[in-house]
Image (tube, helix red, strand yellow):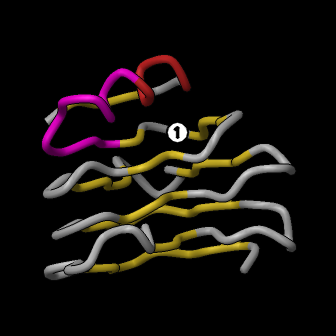
Amino acid sequence: MRAVSNEEELVAAAVDAERIVVQGKITVGRSLRLMPGQRLAGGGDDATLVFAADVDGVGLTRDNEVAGLRIQVDPARRAVYNDTAIDDLGTIRLAGVTAAGQ
């Protein structure tokens, strides 16, 4: 488990952490693609990812989980999306996710 509280920590954790826990509100300048098997969770009621206006939010690949998190993107962008290059998504679990955007 790796707790993150800024974009730099979030991007680094996405490379190799099995479970990423978001602490507070993080502004993110690019899409976040979860690796197969990764889990992304909020670490409290204020856990929020706010993505830049010109990017999508969280990309899912295979056997991912997103829980207890607010994800905010531009209204024309996707808050959570799947990687269409992946043939088998396995099991995707979303729980307690609030999404603003598409």
Which quadrant does the C terminus fall into? Answer: bottom right
The answer to whether residue 88 is left or right of residue 77 is left
Which quadrant does the N terminus fall into? Answer: top left
- Quadrant of the image occupied by residue 57: bottom right
The answer to whether residue 26 is left or right of residue 54 is left
Tell which of 42 and 27 is nearer to you.
Answer: 27
Q: Name the residue under label 1.
A: 24
Please tell me which residue is depicted at 28% across the width and 29% down the height of the picture: 15
Please tell me which residue is depicted at 38% across the width and 53% down the height of the picture: 42
The region drawn magenta spans 12-21
- Count of labels shown? 1
Percent coordinates x, y for residue 53 in the rendering: 86, 50
- Is residue 18 within the magenta segment? yes
- Quadrant of the image occupied by residue 16: top left
Tell me the SS state at disc 1.
loop
- Is residue 43 within the magenta segment? no
Label 1 neighbour load within 10 Å: few <14, some 14-19, many 20+: some
- Quadrant of the image occupied by residue 29: top right
Please tell me which residue is depicted at 30% across the width and 42% down the height of the picture: 21
Tell which of 56 and 99 is nearer to you.
Answer: 56
Percent coordinates x, y for residue 36 in the rendering: 19, 56
Percent coordinates x, y for residue 76 in the rendering: 86, 72
Please tell me which residue is depicted at 40% across the width and 41% down the height of the picture: 22
Q: Please, what is the three-letter code of the amino acid marked with disc 1?
A: Gly
The answer to whether residue 76 is left or right of residue 25 is right
Q: In the image, is residue 96 above or below residue 20? A: below
Percent coordinates x, y for residue 59 in the rendering: 46, 60
Q: In the image, is residue 57 above or below residue 18? A: below
